[in-house]
Amino acid sequence: MQRAVERKKGRQEVLKAPLIGAINDIAVRLDKDQQIDVDSSERPGSRLQESSERLQRKLLIRDSGTVKLIPFEDIDWIDAAGDYMCIHALGETHIMRSTLLDLQKKLDDKLFVRIHRSTMVNITRVVSTSLSQKRGSLLYLADGQTLKVSRNYRESTRKLFQ
């Protein structure tokens, strides 16, 4: 019985491998299409420009063989954990391998602001702010989360609320 159970598990993994490979191929094609669309978006009135704008409004996250597209508007905030980013969106946390600087380049700079050397926030999610100790400040998000703004980024966030 034990061997039969092991064979069945092994066969499921063999069946999953082509599917995971196909999903990864699709993700690679999406990345390439996004690059092509971004490069060709300089032509006004182009259909590729519209496609590019739709793709650019979503963040592609590969996680254990699955690919998730997270709309920028759904992302609440992002924090860095070494070479990994924790994307907090709609009550879930998605993890992707990237640097904060690379991720910042992918995101809409009108929507996301850096508030700490390891944290970015979606400014549409901020409901209030207050001063904290050591010349820093705090941001309160709509979901009840409180984020610390370091003193180095305090001026840039202050401009948002003027």
Image (tube, helix red, strand yellow):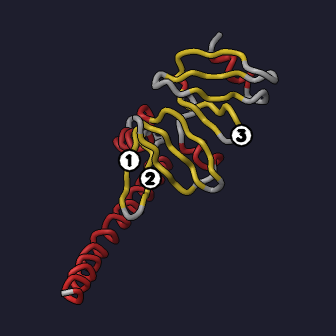
Query: Which quarter of the figure has residue 11?
Result: bottom left
View extreme (front): residue: 1
Label 1 secondary element: strand
Q: Residue 160: x percent and y percent? A: 63, 17
Q: Residue 129: x percent and y percent? A: 62, 16
Label 3 secondary element: loop
Marks 3/1: CA distance? Answer: 25 Å
Amino acid type at circle 1 is Leu
Amino acid type at circle 3 is Arg
Q: Residues within 10 Å of mark 1 (few under 14, many from 20)?
A: few
Q: Residue at x 28, y 75 (%)?
A: 18
Look at the image and tell me in which quarter the C terminus lies: top right
Q: Earlier in the sequence, mark 2 or mark 3?
A: 2
Look at the image and tell me in which quarter the N terminus lies: bottom left
Q: Residues within 10 Å of mark 3 (few under 14, many from 20)?
A: some
Observer able to see residue 44: no
Q: Which mark is residue 61?
A: 2
Q: Residue 81: x percent and y percent? A: 62, 50
Q: Residue at x 73, y 28 (%)?
A: 153
Of circles 3 and 1, the one toward us is: 3
Question: Residues at badges 2 and 1 in contact (C-beta under 8 Å)?
Answer: yes
Amino acid type at circle 2 is Ile
Q: Residue 9: x percent and y percent? A: 25, 79
Q: Which mark is residue 117?
A: 3
Marks 2/1: CA distance? Answer: 6 Å
Instruction: Give the residue at mark 1.
Output: 69
Q: Residue at x 61, y 22 (%)?
A: 139
Marks 2/3: CA distance? Answer: 22 Å
- Taking the image as shown, residue 65 lies to the left or right of residue 116, namely left
46 and 142: which one is in front? 142
Label 2 secondary element: strand
